Amino acid sequence: MNKTMRFFIIALAAFAVLGLMACSNNDEQAITEETPLAVEPETSGRAVVGYTVERGSLASAVEVSGTVEGIREATVQSETQGVLLEVLVDLGQNVKAGDVLLKFDDQVERAALRQAESQYESARLEVDGIQWQFDRGSASKAQLVRAQAAAAGAESALAQAQRNFDNRTIRAPIDGAVADIARSVSPGNLIGPGTQVLRIVDTGKLKMRVGVGQNAVARIEPGNIVQVTVPSVSSKPYEAVVRSVGAAADPTTGSFPVIVEWDNSVETPVRAGASGIAMIYDSSAGQSLIVPAAAIDSRNSETVVFIEEDDRAVQKTVVLAGKRGARAAVLEGINDGDVIIATGIASLQNGDPVLIDLAGSSLDLR
């Protein structure tokens, strides 16, 4: 075989090897691109219903309704007649006792006050002078008595002039908010004495007067726990107490008056005049953690519940105080504010993933 033929055979073999290698690489790339990596499916949680745990009572309660009032209210009247000069407050404005609300034109009263001050000062100096003379025997007792009487009259006139002047300015009698301003209260209007010009309500603390039937009033006494709901403001009840219970029934309605009180909320404040519903618990009412009765289960001779933490069911051993209707009372084992699972308890295990549907507060259960 000559050299030319040998070179041709070697070159042909080399091209064949390179072709096989290229095909192999293409096949591997195709396999890599076309065959997806296996991905483990995500574990989805079980859908369950939950409630926020809050403190309450299982004791029997009397449900009554009433109108919310400020703990103190003051109707402000004009003590004088005159032309209104300034209105210094608006509806809803907070005021402190002593703040100026309205001002009348006081030119006449100011002049009268200056005159009364001058007359009193003159009368006082007259008494001092006659007293000096009387002490030295140059003035009679009758002269001194007349001077003292004149000074007393001048002092009385000064006090009246001061009252007249002060009445030209109307001040807030209590701390609170301006609840109402009369239509006649406008600069330039003539206001007569005894006219109701505005109303101030102290809503820092609230009260509600309700009527309770004779069968229920025997179980109610001052200090009883009350939960007041004002539907127009919030579905969450406000914690209140019974302040007083009437000694006799209203002759018209036959019900006994009961007054409940509570501190107004900063987050969800209630305005005076709103309608409220009061649940008054009897004297045996005690505060405990309220949970759905359906959330209670027994595992290995222990009473347990499941709460939701980080989208998982966490089993908690609890001490049960009792059950009533859809509610159960827990003494220990969980905390106020926990989200407790109320459905699917029988098959639920500690650590199971869950998707919580929050239905509200445990106090909403009846």
Image (cartoon, helix red, strand yellow):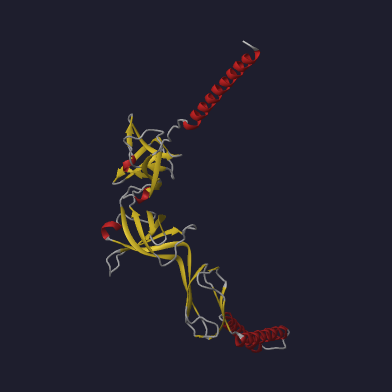
Residue 100 position in % (x across, y down): 57, 74
Camera sees residue 332: no
The residue under the point 43% across, 39% down is 311
In the picture shown, does residue 348 fall above or below 88? above
Q: Quadrant of the N terminus?
A: top right
Q: Quadrant of residue 158?
A: bottom right
- Which residue in the rendered view is the most extreme toward the front? 2
Residue 97 position in % (x across, y down): 55, 69
Q: Is residue 321 left or right of residue 146?
A: left
Q: Is residue 335 left or right of residue 65?
A: right
Q: Quadrant of residue 95?
A: bottom right
The residue under the point 31% across, 42% down is 294
The residue under the point 38% across, 58% down is 229
Camera sees residue 186: yes
- Which residue in the rendered view is the most extreme toward the top? 1
**Which is nearer the eye, 147 or 296?**
296
**Which is nearer the eye, 362 or 281?**
362
In the picture shown, does residue 158 fall above or below 172? below
The residue under the point 32% across, 49% down is 59
**Which is nearer the eye, 100 or 41?**
41
